[in-house]
Each structure stands twice: as C-alpha cells, then as structure tokens.
Image (cartoon, rainbow, N blue to C red):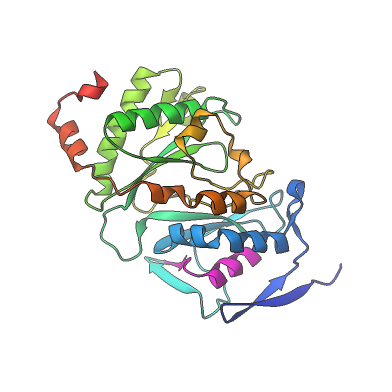
Amino acid sequence: MPAAVQGSILIEGQELAITNPDKLLWPEMGITKLVYLQRLTELAPYLIKHCKGRYLTTIRYPNGIHGKSFYQKNCPQPRPDFVTLAPLETIDYIELNSLPTLLWLGNLACLEFHASFDRIGEPVHPTEWMIDLDPSLEDEPRIMEAASIVGELLRSLGIQSVPKTSGATGVQIIVPLQPELTFDELRVIGQFVGEFVSRAHPHLFTIERMKKDRGTCIYFDYLQHYRGKTLSAPYTPRARKASSVSTPLLWEEVARDVKPADYHLLNIASRLQKMGDLIDTVPPQRLRPILQFIRSGKQAAPLQ
C-alpha cells in the first residue's frame, strides 16, 4: 500500500493539514482533492454566506463520488479550535462561518453542504421560503418548464423569487422573506400554490408524498421547508459526474431550458465574477397579506 501523502497550507492564520491531495474525487472531471480545495476557496464567499448561522449537514465521500458516502451532522473529531460548534439537542453541529472551516471539511471529503432552514439560536421566523421541485424521473426534460410555471404564478401573486438548480435533478425556488411568518404559516401558502399548479397541470405536478404514487409527475414539495429540515445550500457542489454546483439562475435562463450540469466546479467562478449572487437581487418579500388572503377563503383575481 502506498504511503499517504500529506502537506499543509496556511489560511487566515490557521494551519491546515491536507491529506492525499492527488486523490480523484470527481474522476470524470479530473478533479482531485487539491483542485477541489482550490475551487472551494473560490466558492467560499457565496457558500459560507448561505450556511453561516445555520445547522450544517455534510455528505462525505472519502474515496470520491463513486465510493461509499455518509451523512455527517456531528462534528468530526479531532476538531480544530477554529471550528465553531452549534449544539442542538444531542448533536454538535458545525457552523460553517469561515474559510478555514470550509477547507477543513473539504479535506475530509465533504462534497455536499446542506444547511438548515432554521437559524442557530434564532426565533422561529424563516428568512426565506424555498419551494422544492423534485422530479420523479432521473432525467426530467420538463423541470425548467415546471419552474417557469411556478415562477409565473408567484409573480401573479406579487411575489419575487429566484430559481436555483439543486445541482442534481431538481430546481428550488427561493423567496427571500421579511422574518414575520412561522414555518407553519409558510406551509399554508406552499400548500395553496402546490394544490393550484397540481390542479392546473395534473400531468406535470403532484403534491403526493408517496413516491410510488407520483407516476412521472414532478413533486411540488412544500413540506420540506420546515424547522429541522435541510436542502442543498446555494453554491454547494454535488456528488454528480459533472461536479455540478447548486446555482441560482435568472428567469431568462430558466426560459432557455438550461441544464443543472451546465454549472459546475470548473466554471462556476467565472459566472460568479460576472453575475454575483443572484439571490441578492430580490429584496425580502412580505407574504402576510398573501396568507391573510388565502385564509379569508377568497379567490385571488390573478388565479381566476
């Protein structure tokens, strides 16, 4: 067995051990651990921004994307002093709040970063609403069409939003929020929108929770957005052959039917340099009037 290769780097005053830098993590893309850490450094300002202050779950692939993987909630040991813990019940979560922490996790072959919807130590008032469109088919050519339909419905209700690829097969639609509604109140709005699109497009959408009963429809998941649950964080890499990255989009790109694999570790930096964080382009939305309207039992004019 060949001897393990190890070196170290100095990041923001912290010395990090780097093990097996030449190990292939995404073989089809030729991405080694060293290349991955370089790309993570480019993603860091965006990925950290959307994970900071949240409970972090990672997925580790010690031998690359084709090897065995496991979810990690508890902080691995030994833990460097610069890694911040966020205890919750019986779990010592990590708060991803610095570049050294991100690269330490990258060296451990954490290839995916999933952030909680609830914030560390904060009242239960979400700062965003996220709709998850989850295909039943591994290759779903209608996913951007489905996202466009949901986006147009939200616009008809006066709600601005940002679509993003999951980096896998789905699309999420993000609505930045003024922190005034609870998770349960957001579910009321989500159920309303999900039921409407499922009735209007019964061969495209479903809100059926059981996978076996969804057929080929795209699951409109309004239940995932809840305290204690996670989704792929904006700008997280994904353990896919294309090394795809969960990427916020322009609605014009959705209309052009872009593919999740179009945005990956080897080209995401140039996109971010050009476009910045598209989530920042939408101001926090106020949805309480929508909630009150739904609860009043009246039919909104745009839906007539």
Q: Is 139 placed above or below 275 here?
A: above
Residue appearing at x 53%, y 52% in the figure: 235
Q: Is 173 placed above or below 112 here?
A: above
Stretch of the chain drawn in magenta: 91-108
Residue appearing at x 28%, y 47% in the figure: 183
Quadrant of the rendered structure where residue 198 is?
top left
Q: Is residue 100 magenta?
A: yes
Residue 64: x and y, percent? 71, 54
Viewer-proximal residue, 248 or 236? 248
Quadrant of the rendered structure where residue 263 is?
top right
Residue 13 horizontal side relative to residue 248, left or right: right
Viewer-proximal residue, 267 or 275? 275
Residue 296 horizontal side relative to residue 32, left or right: left
Q: Is 232 placed above or below 90 here?
A: above
Q: Is residue 297 magenta?
A: no
Quadrant holding the C terminus? top left
Residue 264: x and y, percent? 63, 47
Residue appearing at x 36%, y 24% in the figure: 197
- The answer to whether one can see residue 108 in this image is no
Residue appearing at x 32%, y 26% in the figure: 195
